[in-house]
């Protein structure tokens, strides 16, 4: 089963497509594949082209695994970031994934006392 969610930037544009690959009832691990939006439909502004960005596993105890790049399985981990906006979007993506994971676990709090974004 997969569930797709788009992460938007501060301007409201879709910047990442997150495809959840874990089952909704899984309360111990959240897994997803993330693609960056690389092109939009000229008539509708809907995302039309995507590039592999990362695969992740976030566990209930906050331990997280991120595999980056074109082929996350090759162990290379390459990812291209261009400019400050790319770094900010990456940080926002990690927070977005973390909140999705803990929402799936039924937890409305961060797992460690005193943690905050």
Image (tube, grey):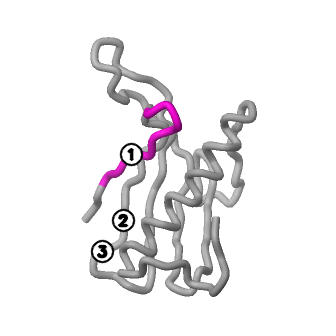
Residue pushed farthest top? 43
Q: Which of 106 and 63 is in front in this view?
A: 106
Q: Which of marks 3 and 1 is nearer the N terminus?
A: 1
**Quick check: is 90 in the magenta stretch?**
no
**Quick check: is 7 in the magenta stretch?**
yes
Quadrant of the snapshot with the N terminus: bottom left
- How many angstroms separate mark 1 from mark 2 (CA)? 14 Å
Identify which residue is drawn at 63% across, 48% down.
90
Please provide the residue range marked out in magenta.
4-12
Q: Is residue 60 above or below residue 38?
A: below
Classify 10 Å Cα crowding around label 1: few (below 14), some (14-19), many (20 and above). Answer: some
Q: Which of marks 1 and 2 is nearer the N terminus?
A: 1
- How many angstroms separate mark 3 from mark 1 (CA)? 18 Å
Could you say whether the residue bearing mark 2 is in a helix, strand or loop? loop
Q: In this rendering, which labeled residue sits more in front, label 3 or label 1? A: 1
- Asked whether disc 1 touches disc 2, contact meaning CB atoms under 8 Å apart, the reply is no
Could you say whether the residue bearing mark 1 is in a helix, strand or loop? strand
Q: In this view, does 2 lie to the left or right of 40?
A: left
Identify which residue is drawn at 52% across, 80% down.
59
Q: Position of residue 82 (x, y in %)?
A: 72, 31
Q: Where is residue 29 in the image (x, y as percent from the top left)?
A: 45, 80
Q: Position of residue 8 (x, y in %)?
A: 45, 41
Identify which residue is drawn at 37% across, 30% down.
47
Identify which residue is drawn at 59% across, 45% down.
70
Tell me the number on the disc at residue 21: 2
Which residue is the site of mark 1? 6
Could you say whether the residue bearing mark 3 is in a helix, strand or loop? loop
Quadrant of the snapshot with the C terminus: bottom right
- Asked whether disc 3 touches disc 1, contact meaning CB atoms under 8 Å apart, the reply is no
Tell me the number on the disc at residue 23: 3
């Amino acid at each position: 089963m997969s569930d797709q969610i788009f992460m938007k930037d501060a301007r409201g544009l879709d910047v990442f497509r997150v495809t959840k690959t874990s089952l909704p009832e899984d309360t111990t691990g959240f897994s997803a594949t993330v693609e960056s939006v690389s092109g939009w439909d000229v008539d509708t502004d809907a995302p039309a082209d995507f590039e592999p960005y990362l695969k992740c596993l976030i566990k209930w105890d906050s331990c997280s695994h991120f595999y980056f790049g074109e082929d996350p399985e090759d162990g290379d981990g390459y990812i291209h970031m261009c400019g400050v906006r790319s770094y900010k979007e990456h940080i926002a993506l990690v927070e977005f994934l973390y909140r999705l994971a803990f929402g799936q676990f039924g937890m409305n709090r961060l797992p460690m006392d005193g943690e905050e974004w």
